[in-house]
Amino acid sequence: MPASTAIGDSILNCYLRGIVPVPPARLWVALHTADPTVTGANEVLLSAWPSYIRRDPSAGGTMDTAFTPSANKLVANALRMEYGIMDGPTPLVITHFALWNALIGGQMYIYGTLDVSKTLAPSDECVINPSRLQATVI
């Protein structure tokens, strides 16, 4: 899973300069219709899905409950994330996800490709079940 410029700089500064990064208070999972790249581009637009919002993977709990403990450089979401009903006018294809430090705007940290793209038709419900969103360090 690729890391954003912010995460890459934090890792280099931590391990090569001894500057300990400050973790975010909360993370938010965004859905993207194409590769976000390091800029966070291609997040779902409200014109395509009017009720879309990023989801808190800890469901309001503490950050340590959002993902499983790291093992062999891999973590997975620990809880179910519900994005609700896709209420846009036409089908929408979700291909990527990203982790952000804010509900709106903010800084993207990590992003990745879904194993299988998901086409959401109007009135489809979008859910990410536990262990389905995985992050690894390569």
Image (cartoon, rainbow, N blue to C red):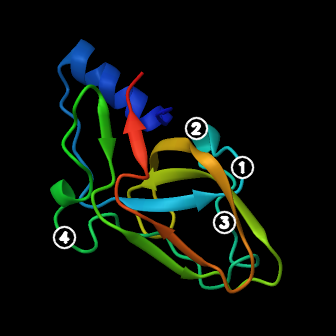
Which quadrant of the figure contains the C terminus? top left
Residue 131 screen position, x and y as percent: 35, 52
Mark nearer the N terminus (4 vs 2): 2
> Going from the N terminus, do you reach mark 3 or mark 2 first?
2
Q: Nearer the viewer, residue 123 or 98?
A: 123
Q: Amino acid at mark 4?
A: Gly
- Residue 96 x/y as whole percent: 61, 50
The residue tagged 2 is 38
Q: Residue at x 79, y 73 (%)?
A: 91
Amino acid residing under circle 2: Val
Amino acid on which disc 1 is placed: Ala
At mark 2, the secondary structure is helix
Give the distance between the C-alpha atoms of the residues marked 1 and 2, in whole angstroms: 12 Å
Of badges 4 and 2, nearer the viewer stands 4
Residue shown at the point (63%, 39%) measured from the top left: 37
**Residue at the far right in the pictured view:** 90
Kind of residue sitting beneath label 3: Val
**In the drawing, does residue 40 fall left or right of residue 21?**
right
Q: CA distance from mark 1 to mark 3?
A: 9 Å
In the image, 86: left or right of 75?
right
| Residue 34: image tag | 1
Residue 44 is marked as 3
Of residues 87 and 50, which is closer to you in this image? Answer: 87
Label 2 Cα neighbours within 10 Å, binned few <14 / some 14-19 / many ≥20: some
Q: Circle 4 sits in a helix, a strand or a loop, which is it? A: loop
Position above or below: 29 against 107: below
Q: CA distance from mark 1 to mark 4?
A: 29 Å
Residue hosting label 4: 61
The correct choice, above or below, for 94 with respect to 82 in the image is above
Sooner in the amino-acid sequence: mark 1 or mark 3? 1
Name which residue lies at 83% across and 78% down: 90
